[in-house]
Image: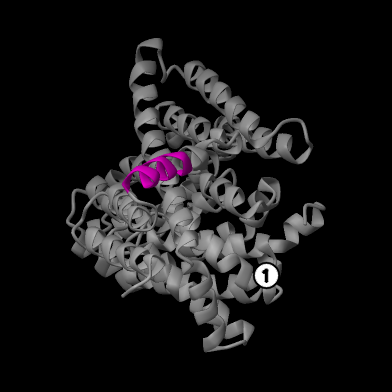
Amino acid sequence: MLAPSAVAALILLVGVVVLIAASVPIAVAIGLPSLLAAMAVLGPENAAMAVTQRMFTGVNSFSLLAIPFFVLAGALMNSGGIAARLIDAAKILVGRMPASLAQTNVVANGMFGSVSGAAVAAASAVGTVMHPRMRQEGYSAPYAAAVNVASAPAGMLIPPSNTFIVYSLVSSTSIAALFMAGVGPGLMWVLTCIVVALLLARKENYQRETERPNLSVVLLTLWRAVPSLFMIFIVIGGILLGWFTPTESAAIAVVYCLVLGMIYRNIHVADLPRILLTATRTTSIVMLLVAVSAALSWVMAFAGIPSMIADGLTAVSDNRVVILVLIMFILLAVGTFMDPTPAILIFVPIFLPVVTELGVDPVHFGAMVVMNLSLGVITPPVGNVLFVGAQVADLRIEPVIAKLWPYLLGLLLSLLVVVFLPQISLWLPTTLGLV
């Protein structure tokens, strides 16, 4: 007869896999097996009480309060006309390159993602503006959609980033150090998309723009984008200088974006209920995922699953390179069907002790994990940014996926470079004395 812990492990494994395969919402696919597994060990009454308590404990964190503020700041940016100004600035910067509109899309996604921290928001806001322009200039719809989808997750790495906040919660790592560690991989993501877009553009024979803007237009366009980009310096600079905490910086970002949107006259008082409702929906989903993932992590620990996985990894090899590659491929597989937030909350507590034993810095590992799971949001079959990008382009996902594979391969190579060259993620936080 199986021990209660073995029964719990079996319920978790089978339950989560079956429910996700059945396209059940991820919160239910995680939460229901967690409750049933806890019942197998503790009994119905104690299990309900314990799981509820763990869910509450999982979200009862001052650091997590930054997430709803950054989500609201992103919603205000999306409505505040910021995307259009950033796109115009990006066009000035890369407008003379081959396939200039594709490069503009990539750089604009990097800029917008860096001020919003949200890949879905970037794909929607930038794609809505750029896709019609690219189609008008003769770019194919799948090519335009793939460029937008591939470059949107750069904002998950370039600070501020909600994903790094979640990693900080489970790893007890400095948020400021993690934010700085994301800059190098984030820029690599943008550069990879630029290179792939260039190579594909040559194959498709897409040309650069021939019109050269005069100096006054260049200066005016860049000046109009400065207030939008200045938020990055307020948030990150304030954290690094110790003026305020990440949560306080997120609240300041909300006020700044609201004032900026009203100055631009793109946000009015009548728009605020709609913006708040959008932010509330997104925040509710994220925090529910955090809560059920915390419960799942507790049940897994209670059943001894993390130690079994760690023992299995070390049994395969004691070679650092082999272990890191194995963990990265596990996370790549997980990221194809699970959102980054629950994936971090569930798997980082399992893998972090293993990699620290091998001498991997937790900040470097955080950059690896976030870059890895950022690939998941654009990877079929579940990638939410992939679906948003296809929807913006009014396409089915199949033609978008066909054009997306070169980007996925290029980004996978970039991930391996980040994994095995720690200086890419650690140089900036080390230079600033954060590590």
Q: What segment carries the magenta color?
A: 44-54
| Residue 178 falls left or right of residue 59 | right
Q: Residue visible at 63% across and 77% down?
A: 420
Q: Is residue 268 visible?
A: yes
- Dot 1 corresponds to which residue? 356
| Residue 273 falls left or right of residue 357 | left
From what the image shows, is residue 36 above or below residue 335? above
* Towards the viewer: 305 or 117: 305
| Residue 167 falls left or right of residue 23 | right
Find residue 427 and report its horizontal and vertical position in percent.
Answer: 74, 62
Q: Is residue 210 visible?
A: no
Find residue 195 and report its horizontal and vertical position in percent.
Answer: 48, 68
| Residue 331 falls left or right of residue 188 | left
* Secondary structure found at label 1: helix
Q: Residue visible at 20% across and 56% down?
A: 23
Please, what is the three-letter code of the amino acid marked with disc 1? Thr
Query: Is residue 416 one of those drawn in magenta?
Result: no
| Displayed quadrant of residue 160 | top right
| Displayed quadrant of residue 403 | bottom left
The crowding category of the residue bearing disc 1, from other C-alpha atoms within 10 Å (few below 14, some 14 to 19, many at least 20), is few
The C terminus: image quadrant: bottom right
